[in-house]
């Protein structure tokens, strides 16, 4: 497996997908990896070890949960997988690019092209309507304001909010706010959607709508990773990666069952 040697172009330029780097044989027929962690650790001053030698591969088109209790390391995993932080040791590759070899500008371009984020508390701009909030997801993609708004409307329609274009966050329910956040994450066409406790701030009915939407997006081809402490949500997804004390303790799916 060889990491692409060409530098990552600016976010406003097309980013060519690196060639498939699977080994010959049966594995070569698998979809390409979107994220690969090899021996990834993350340590902080005071002897805190948030990740301890994590190996994980997420293939294009998968839907999985990273699940564990508070303090298990799953939030650190989100930061690492999303290139918001780098590991202390080990390697992380996203879309075939070695995160450790990229500058801050190149990491920003990588995120803009390949990763969408959905957070528990929405992070929507107050006073801006749904279209503008979603269009902000394209600020660093070199797209004109008119095109940004057109794509934002399309993304909102995709999450069934075309009747809420002109509404500000204060005029939306919690579930609608989360759907706006999902539309913002999707507007750039990312290969990977990282959802951090996407139902944590919602009532049960709204949470079910959000999870149904994530399943629909996965069925349409988006790779979806849900970070959660909710075992019920995790068990509803095709693959479950369970964390405890900074380590993966089990990785199960309909195709395989690996326990450590």
Image: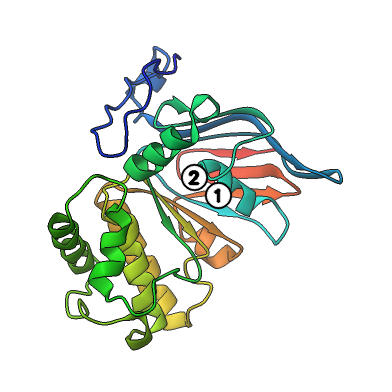
Q: Secondary structure at mark 1?
A: helix
Whether residue 154 appears in this view of the structure is yes
On screen, residue 31 above or below 159? above
Is residue 51 positioned above or below 139 on the image? above
Residue at 37% across, 76% down: 177
Image label count: 2
Graded by Cα atoms within 10 Å as few (under 14), some (14 to 19) or many (20 or more), the crowding at tag 2 reads many
Name the image quarter holding the N terminus.
top left
What's the residue at 25%, 61% (across, down)?
Answer: 135
Residue name at image x 39 percent, y 67 percent: 211
| Picture coordinates of residue 199, whole percent (x, y) | 48, 71
Question: Which residue does the image show at 55% across and 49% down from the upper left?
Answer: 78
State the residue in front, 210 or 109. Answer: 109
Give the image location of residue 50, x and y in percent: 73, 46
Residue nearer the viewer, 242 or 75: 75
Seen from the viewer's position, the closer of residues 226 and 115 is: 115
Instruction: Name the foreground residue: 169 vs 259.
Output: 169
Q: Position of residue 30 (x, y in %)?
A: 36, 28
Quarter the C terminus occupies: top right
Q: Which residue is mark 1?
A: 78
Name the residue that disc number 2 marks: 82
Residue sitting at the far bottom: 171
Image check: 48 left or right of 9? right
On screen, residue 165 above or below 135: below
Q: On the rendered structure, is 202 left or right of 241?
A: left
How far is disc 2 from disc 1 in space, using C-alphas? 6 Å
Residue 103 percent location from the top left of the image: 49, 30
Asked if disc 2 and disc 1 are in contact, CB closer than 8 Å, the reply is yes
Q: Secondary structure at mark 2?
A: loop
Q: Residue furthest right?
A: 46
Q: Is residue 215 visible?
A: no
């Amino acid at each position: 497996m060889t990491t692409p040697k060409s530098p990552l172009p600016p976010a406003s330029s097309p980013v060519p997908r690196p060639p498939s780097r699977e080994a010959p044989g049966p594995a070569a027929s698998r979809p390409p990896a979107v994220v690969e962690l090899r021996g990834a650790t993350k340590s902080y001053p005071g002897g805190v070890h948030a990740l301890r030698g994590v190996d994980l591969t997420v293939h294009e088109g998968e839907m999985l949960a990273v699940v564990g209790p508070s303090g298990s390391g799953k939030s650190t995993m989100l930061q690492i997988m999303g290139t918001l932080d780098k590991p202390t040791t080990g390697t992380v590759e996203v879309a075939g690019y070695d995160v450790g070899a990229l500058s801050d500008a190149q990491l920003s371009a990588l995120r803009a092209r390949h990763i969408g984020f959905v957070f528990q508390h929405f992070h929507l701009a107050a006073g801006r309507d749904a279209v503008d909030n979603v269009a902000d997801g394209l600020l660093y993609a070199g797209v004109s304001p008119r095109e940004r708004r057109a794509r934002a409307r399309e993304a909102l329609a995709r999450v069934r909010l075309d009747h809420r274009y002109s509404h500000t966050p204060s005029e939306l329910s919690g579930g609608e706010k989360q759907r706006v956040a999902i539309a913002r994450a999707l507007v750039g066409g990312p290969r990977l959607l990282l959802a951090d406790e996407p139902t944590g701030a919602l009532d049960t009915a709204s949470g079910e709508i959000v999870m149904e939407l994530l399943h629909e997006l996965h069925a349409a081809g988006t790779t979806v990773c849900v970070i959660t402490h909710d075992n019920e949500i995790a068990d509803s997804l095709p693959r479950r990666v369970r964390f405890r004390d900074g380590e993966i303790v089990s990785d199960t799916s309909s195709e395989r069952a690996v326990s450590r």
